[in-house]
Image: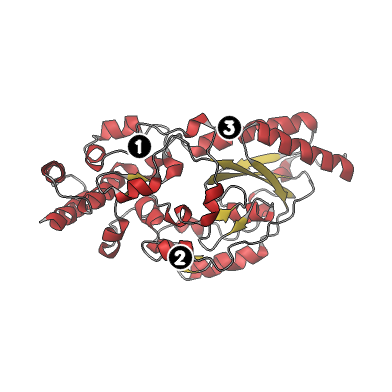
Amino acid sequence: MDFSNKQIIKNKLLPSELTELSKKIKKEGIALGFQQIGITGVDLSKDEIYLEKWLSLGRNGEMRYMSSHGKKRSRPSMIVPQTLKIISARMDYLTPESEESIKILKNKKKAFISRYALGRDYHKVLKGRLKKLVAFIEEQIRDYNFRIFVDSAPVLEKAIARNAGLGWIGKNTNLINPKAGSFFFLGEIYTDLDLPHDSQTSNHCGSCVACIDCCPTNAIVAPYQLDARKCISYLTIEHKSSIPIKYRKKIGNRIYGCDDCQLFCPWNKFADPSKITDFKVRHNLDRANLIDLFLWSKDEWEKNLRGSAMRRVGYEGWLRNLAIALGNSEKSNDLMLALIKRKNHPSSMVREHVEWALEQHN
C-alpha cells in the first residue's frame, strides 16, 4: 500500500491522544501473543553506513537481495511513502518440549535444526497476528494507513527493533533483549500515524565474547561484524550451490541453520518458553535421526515440511546438508547404505556431497 495515494489526513490527534493510543496498541499486542511492542521513527542513517560497508566487503555472499533494493532498507519512506513511525513487535519461539540443543549437537547420529524452524513457518504466524493488531488500531482511529512486514521486504528489522527499545544488537549481530535473550521473531508495521516513539535499550554485551569464541566457522570476524559467507546458517540455507569443503567438517550435524552464537550467549538464560502452539515441534524434528531424514523421498519431504520455514532450502539443498552431516557422523552399515542409495542422484550437487561423505568413512 502506497500511503501517498491515500487521502490526506484532515484531523490531527493531540499528543495526549497519541500517547493513549500507543498504550492501547501495546496492550493489544500482548493480548495477541507478542511479548513486546515498541515504536520508533524512520531514521536509520547510521545503519545505512554500516550496511553499505558490509555489502562493499561482499559479506552478503549469494544473498544478492541484500543489495538489489538500493537504499530502501535504510530509508523506510522509500518502501512506503509518508511513513512516519514503525511499530516493532517481538514474539518468543522456544518451545518447552523440544530436546535440549546442546545434547543434540553432541549426538552425531541426530540432526540439529535451528530451533526457530521446528514448528510452523513463523512468517504466517506473525503476519496473521499483526493483521489483527492493525485491525484493532483501525477500530480506534480512522484515515491512517498501515503496512505489515515479516521478512517480506527490504527492512532493517533488527535496527528498527533496537530503535524501538526491544533490545540491543549484540556482538553476534543478533538482537538481544535483557529479559528474554535472543530466541524471538520480529515483525513490523509501517504507518503514517505519528505515534510517540520509545527509548533505546543500552548495550549490555560488555567484555563478553562467548558468541565469537564458540562460532564453529569463525563467522563473527570481529565484535558486531558477521561474514555471512562463513556462517553455517547462511551456508545451509541461503547458499544454493556446493558448500566449500573447508567448512564441511565444521558444520557437524547442523542440517538447517546454527544456533551456537545464541546457545552460548549468557543472556539466553533469561529466554522464556513460548506459549504459541504453532511453534510446537513437528515430526520430532528436534531429535530426528540423520539417516531417516536423508531417506525421505521428495514426496515425504513435501508432506512433512508443508507449512515449514525449512522449505526454503529446497529438497536438493536438504539432501546436500544431510550428506555433509552423515559424512561427519559415526560410520555404520545403515549409514553407508543410505549414502550409496543417493550416490547416483540426478542432482550433481547432491552427488558431489554424497561422494564427499563416503570419502570420510573410507
Q: Amino acid at mark 3?
A: Gly
Among the two numbered marks 1 and 2 on one chain, the one whose residue lies closer to the N terminus: 2
Among the two numbered marks 3 and 2 on one chain, the one whose residue lies closer to the N terminus: 3
Q: Amino acid at mark 2?
A: Ile
Label 1 belongs to which residue? 285
Q: Position of residue 360 (x, y in %)?
A: 16, 57
Q: CA distance from mark 1 to mark 3?
A: 24 Å
Q: Residues within 10 Å of mark 2 (few under 14, many from 20)?
A: many
Q: Is residue 135 above or below residue 47?
A: above
Mark 1 and mark 3 residues within 8 Å of each other at the beta carbon: no
Q: CA distance from mark 3 to mark 2?
A: 35 Å
Q: Position of residue 107 (x, y in %)?
A: 28, 47
Give the left or right position of residue 83, taking residue 293 as reference.
right
Q: Residues within 10 Å of mark 3 (few under 14, many from 20)?
A: few
Q: CA distance from mark 1 to mark 2?
A: 27 Å
Measuring 27% from the left and 31% from the top, which residue is drawn there? 299
